Amino acid sequence: MAHGGGPRQVKLDRESELRIEVGYDTPLKFRLLSGTAEIFGNELPPDIWLTPSRPGLNLLQAFVFTWNGATVEMEGGTETEYWADENGDTALNPCCPMTPILRSLDLGASVKEIRMDIFPIEFTLKIPNGIPPMAHGGGPRQVKLDRESELRIEVGYDAPLKLRLLSGTAEIFGTELPPDFWLTFPPRLKFAVFTLNGATIEMEAVRKPSTRLMRYTPNISYVNVHAVLEERRHRAKPLPPDDPNSQGPRVIVVGPTDSGKSTLSKMLLSWAAKKGWKPTFVDLDIGQGAITIPGCIAATPIEMPIDPVEGIPLDIPLVYFYGHTTPSNNVDLYKVLVKELAQVVERQLSGNAESRASGMVINTMGWIEGQGYELLLHAIDTFNANVVLVLGQAPMTVRIFLLNSQEKLWSMIRNVLKNKPGVDVVKLQKSGGVVSRNAKFRQKSRSHRIREYFYGLANDLSPHSNIANFSDFSVFRIGGGPQAPRSALPIGAEPAADPTRLAPVNINRDLLHTVLAVSFAKEPDQIISRKTITYLAPSAGELPSKYLIAGTVTWLET
């Protein structure tokens, strides 16, 4: 419809959308001249130039949507292409996120230009005198939150953020903030402060955090879900253990990548713990690892609201090492571990009436197509989940892209479970503050998560480097190994590797930076060559076992 050059005005009709692809080498500026418009649910401020850019990357897609009509102006961009499509068929590239792009603005000191470092996109806002951003670095900054509103915060990459509650009541992922008490959040942390009845908070940081105030949030629907789960727990508690209804709600949260599954899980757990329950948290997302390091599935009881800084407690977790960050490396092994984890959790719940009535919350991965969908159904069946929460619907224009994936997943799961009594499949809108993460960002997150395991969130732990002989250890990899020849198989059968077979691994340079799990095995299958290795352990002293399990998870200490 247009290309780079001088300013170009585009008039948008009611309920129309302008889709933009920024060129490969030159950024594009655009602003709202009249009417109202938004990008991914974020309302555009009038007469303010926005300059999106992605350093080191080639392409950015932006969707400008209007309900009642608007006029926008664009300038710059080499071979920049703009187009409008009334059919809504063009898919949004999830690897090119543009949310969140705006900070809420209020009146105050004069500011003309602000750099916003929101990974992986930077924004320059040309702001008229008299309109500063809502938050900045330097001295303390107070922010007033209205009823049922949420402040979304991304801490900078190199400096912590201090925050405290001055008045009212507020919470972070279901955990209530203590009044007039400074909390220190480490760099790179993303969280949201939500208030039901209004609050005032104060923030202080060396580097300005990225913040956004949302006056519409799906948290109210999450609170309603909690109320229903609370009622079911009360119904289950007085019943005898042999009564099938004595089992509290078993909630499994499903949805595509970056739909807010971990966030919702934390909220439901903290709200339940605040009421005195002890729900079990089950984490099946091996890509990020909410309980322990990536590459593991785990479960742990939640007896207190989750600490907004420290996260999930690690006092008594039950952990199974899978060794990879995607189930596709060994789908059958993933199923075996999920089944084993479910059986152990079931035995623990059967012997504790309070934990059984409290139920569980199960966080899942974002792989929902093909084998990923089959693994979701396997988890639902294995853990006997009776509440399936399907996340994925986003507000406003993102909904065009994500609605189909959520509707499809919800419909497929509902059809499969329609003949299973007592199972509810519920659609929930994802939070507009959920940040889309590309592969590079996920890799960095995994690296930081592993580092936290060894050094602690605030570098308050002291891991120990040790030197040992090769003969002191036996390293194995689960899955793979030699296959049986076709001549030894029945007619028509294909040779396949045993997914749970232990294959010995030679200790050599290929194991550098590999994360190894310590096995509880008592006897080795084979003894490996005799040399020496240097390893990093969480604590001093000998390892509890000399049998180690390797996967594909690696970590280079930086």
Image: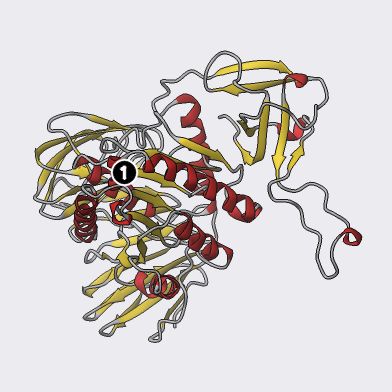
Q: Is residue 498 above or below residue 72?
A: above
Work out whether residue 367 or residue 258 is closer to the camera in this orientation and state it: 367
Q: Position of residue 206 (x, y in %)?
A: 30, 32
Q: Residue at x 20, y 29 (%)?
A: 182
Horizontal side of residue 400 vs 396, given as left or right: right
Quarter containing the C terminus: top right
**Given the image, on which type of amino acid does mark 1 rest?**
Pro
Q: Nearer the viewer, residue 243 or 212?
A: 243
Residue pushed farthest right?
487
Tell me if residue 286 can be seen.
yes
Give x and y (percent) for residue 290: 43, 42
| Crowdedness near tag 1: few (<14), some (14–19) or many (≥20) residues, C-alpha within 10 Å | many
Going by the image, does 500 lie left or right of 48?
right
Picture coordinates of residue 298, whole percent (x, y): 47, 41
Element under disc 1: loop
Q: Position of residue 273 (x, y in %)?
A: 24, 41
- Most distant residue in the top direction: 541
Residue beneath the point at 74% across and 29% down? 524
Question: Which residue lies under the disc numbered 1?
Answer: 279
Q: Quadrant of the N terminus?
A: bottom left
Q: Nearer the viewer, residue 396 or 326?
A: 326
The front one of 213 and 57 is 213
Look at the picture and state if 412 lies above or below 104.
Answer: below
Q: Is residue 153 visible?
A: no
